[in-house]
Amino acid sequence: MRRRDFVFSAGALALLALPLAPVVAAGGTRRLRFGLALSNPGGEALGAQQFLCYLPANLERGQKLRSVELAAPHKLQMDRLGHNWLELNLDSFPAYGRKQMGLTVTVDISEAAMPSPPGQEGEWLRAERYVETGHPAIQALAEQLKAGSPLATARAIFDWVRGNLNYAGYLADDYGALYALEHRRGDCTEYSQLVAALARANGIPARVLGGYVASRDVVPAPGDYHNWAELYLDGAWRVVDAQKQNWLEPAGDYVGFRICSDTPVNALGLAHRFAARGGMRAEL
């Protein structure tokens, strides 16, 4: 799970307790509802404020954002990787003020990975912070796990990571693939980073995603945010989740919000889930 921004107020939890109208998840449709709370803890009014948060991304494997419901004027933005995000601007915020609202997103998602080009293939083969593909220890293990085909190699990586790492529960910080290899422990983030690093070292495009595993319409709890790896195999991006021990399927249960990268690609910078600017606090 990831990280740092899972503080939740009683008011936000109460907002989440409101029932969702039933929506059947036929055709791979998922609806997720969140409680958004914005506040000014200080005794002075604030000027212009901005809140940004990731929404379900448009992904090549067959995921597309359908709709966003928020009872406040907002803008929807998208970047070159398919990230969607919400932008909420406020002219001012009163001293000790607080605003609460519900945010509901609906996403269409294919139950199986859809064939697609790899996109920015070079971007998913390079070494980066937390995915230390070029480190000698990563390279050595990747060579040991190399098999007769990319699919067989990916399976060997999946089996090694799930069989050799110990799940540490929630960790408050990112540690990365090399840490996971050296210490044989981590949470879902380290599992996914190590899978991605070993795959890239074997020439298999790989990326780490953040989002939610949802087989139906849900009101996600703060700790439900999850990271997993996706590898480009046989012409499509496929889920390889060593921590939850899900090999390739079910792609339709994985709702991706963010493709993780050490390079900012949009206005959220390196934020994992959301960003608040101008002095106000945000809980989502």
Image: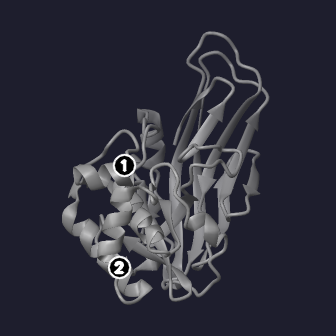
- Label 2 crowding class (10 Å Cα cut-off): few <14, some 14-19, many 20+? some
Q: Is residue 213 visible?
A: no
In the figure, 15 relative to 68: above or below?
Answer: above
Q: Position of residue 278 (x, y in %)?
A: 69, 26
Q: The disc labelled 2 sits on which kind of residue?
A: Lys
Q: Position of residue 238 (x, y in %)?
A: 47, 78
In the figure, 51 relative to 34: above or below?
Answer: above
Residue at x 52% of width, y 45% of height: 35
Left/right of residue 122 with respect to residue 7 in the rendered view: right
Seen from the viewer's position, the closer of residues 132 and 9 is 132
* Residue for badge 1: 223
* Residue for badge 2: 146
Residue at x 20% of width, y 63% of height: 164
Left/right of residue 166 with respect to residue 173 in the rendered view: left
In front: mark 2 or mark 1? 2
The local secondary structure at tag 2 comes to: loop
Residue at x 46% of width, y 35% of height: 11
Q: How many marks?
A: 2
Q: The disc labelled 1 sits on which kind of residue?
A: Gly
In the figure, 211 relative to 92: above or below?
Answer: below
Q: Which residue, as the protein is rendered here, is positioned at the far right?
A: 91
Left/right of residue 130 with respect to residue 52 in the rendered view: left
Q: Earlier in the sequence, mark 2 or mark 1?
A: 2
The local secondary structure at tag 1 comes to: helix
Structure colour scheme? one colour
- Label 1 crowding class (10 Å Cα cut-off): few <14, some 14-19, many 20+? few
Residue at x 67% of width, y 53% of height: 85
Q: Position of residue 112 (x, y in %)?
A: 49, 85
Q: Position of residue 95 (x, y in %)?
A: 64, 15
